[in-house]
Image: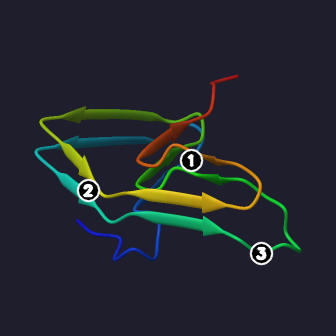
Amino acid sequence: MSGGNSVRIFYVAPGASLTATNLVLTNGSYIKNDSTALTNADGGAIYIDSGTVNMTGCMLANNNVQSIVLARGGAILTTEAP
């Protein structure tokens, strides 16, 4: 599954879950370089917003984030559950 170097592949909302087996996630991208919206760029392939992710036999490759503020989690970023 590819993000085509233009989109994040998965956003896992609070309380939601994602289960993946033998999945290849490539070219996920989340870019925030707008100087008027000073925000972070997080999770190029998967952003886990207090949800749950279970991955078995998966591969993540060539995923990225870019921001003029802060870029975190080129492939996966998770927030802490409350």
Front-most of 37 and 47? Answer: 37
Structural crowding at the residue carrying mark 3, measured as other residues with C-alpha within 10 Å and reported as few (<14), some (14–19) or many (≥20):
few
Q: Which x, y percent locates residue 74?
A: 46, 49
Callout 1: SS? loop
Q: Closer to the observer: label 3 or label 2?
A: 3
Query: In the displayed structure, would residue 30 be above or below residue 5?
Result: above
Please provide percent x and percent y for residue 1.
22, 65
**What residue is disc 3 on?**
34
Residue at the (26%, 53%) spot, across then down: 61
Q: Confirm or deny contact between disc 3 and disc 1 (CB under 8 A).
A: no
Residue type beneath disc 1: Ala
The residue lying at 46 percent from left, 72 percent from top is 7
Q: Position of residue 52 (x, y in %)?
A: 44, 32
Q: Closer to the observer: label 3 or label 1?
A: 3
The C terminus: image quadrant:
top right
> Residue 20's spot in the image, x, y percent?
22, 44
Q: Quadrant of residue 69?
A: bottom right
Which residue carries the number 2 mark? Answer: 25
Specify few, some or many for label 2: CA neighbours under 10 Å numbering under 14, 14-19, or 20 or more: many
Measured Cα–Cα span from mark 3 to mark 2 = 26 Å
Residue at image position (37%, 57%) is 63
How many residues crowd mark 1 within 10 Å: few (<14), some (14–19), many (20+)?
Answer: some
Q: Does residue 28 lie above or below 71 as drawn?
A: below
- In the picture of the structure, the residue carrying the numbered disc 1 is 13
Could you tell me the amino acid type at mark 3? Asp
Residue 82 falls left or right of residue 43: right
Q: CA distance from mark 3 to mark 1?
A: 24 Å
Mark 2: amino acid = Leu
Callout 2: SS: strand
